[in-house]
Amino acid sequence: MDSMAIVWICAIVVFVAIEAATVQLVCIWFGAAALVTLAATLLGAPLWLQLTIFPVCTIILLIATRPFARKLSKGKTVRTNADRILGVKAVVIQEINNDAAEGQVKVMGQIWTARTLDGSVLPEGASVTVKSIEGVKVIVE
């Protein structure tokens, strides 16, 4: 077996091992390019052609598959914890007054301590929208 074939086999193993150790697609394109270059080596390609095939193949694979891989890896985020109330309407059940450090809202059946985003006082019964969560308080508008 040609010594360059051994080099490309080692490169494939290294790139696949790095890919397996990470949670994102990082080195898969290099591993695939090394596999193509190994095939060219076994078919008798000279060294200069091997050293051209590897980067060209890497770039082509990256350009061709990266957008698709990125779309797959993003997925759809499912809110499962407290962040599921962000953007949801709530009802003020105790007047919200930031200066007096008072106020509560009921949102999705839960009662939260609340503060206003702009510091305004909101009366009981007002309808608000949850903008953010800071610790155990919701910030409403």
Image (cartoon, rainbow, N blue to C red):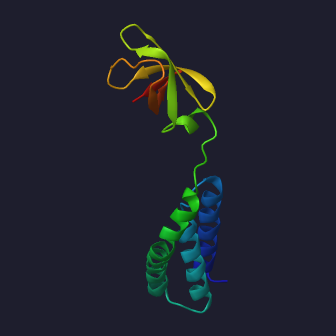
Image vertical order of residue 125 relative to residue 58, above or below: above
**Quarter location, residue 5:** bottom right
* Residue nearest the viewer, comparing 116 with 9: 116
Q: Give residue 121's position: percent from left, percent from top.
A: 36, 17
Q: Quadrant of the N terminus?
A: bottom right
* Residue nearest the viewer, comparing 46 with 122: 122
- At 59% across and 69% down in the image, what residue appears? 11
- At 62% across and 26% down in the image, what residue appears? 110
How many numbered marks are there?
A: 0
| Outermost residue to the front | 125
| Outermost residue to the top | 100
Q: Is residue 62 left or right of residue 13?
A: left
Q: Give residue 38's position: percent from left, percent from top.
A: 60, 81
Image vertical order of residue 7 relative to residue 98, above or below: below
**Quarter location, residue 80:** top right
* Residue 131 visible in this rendered orientation of the protein: no
* Residue nearest the viewer, comparing 133 with 129: 129
Q: Give residue 54's position: percent from left, percent from top.
A: 49, 78
* Residue 132 visible in this rendered orientation of the protein: yes
Q: Give residue 102's position: percent from left, percent from top.
A: 45, 11
- At 43% across and 10% down in the image, what residue appears? 101
Image vertical order of residue 68 relative to residue 52, above or below: above
- At 60% across and 43% down in the image, what residue appears? 79
Q: Is residue 138 left or right of residue 39?
A: left
Q: Quadrant of the C terminus?
A: top left
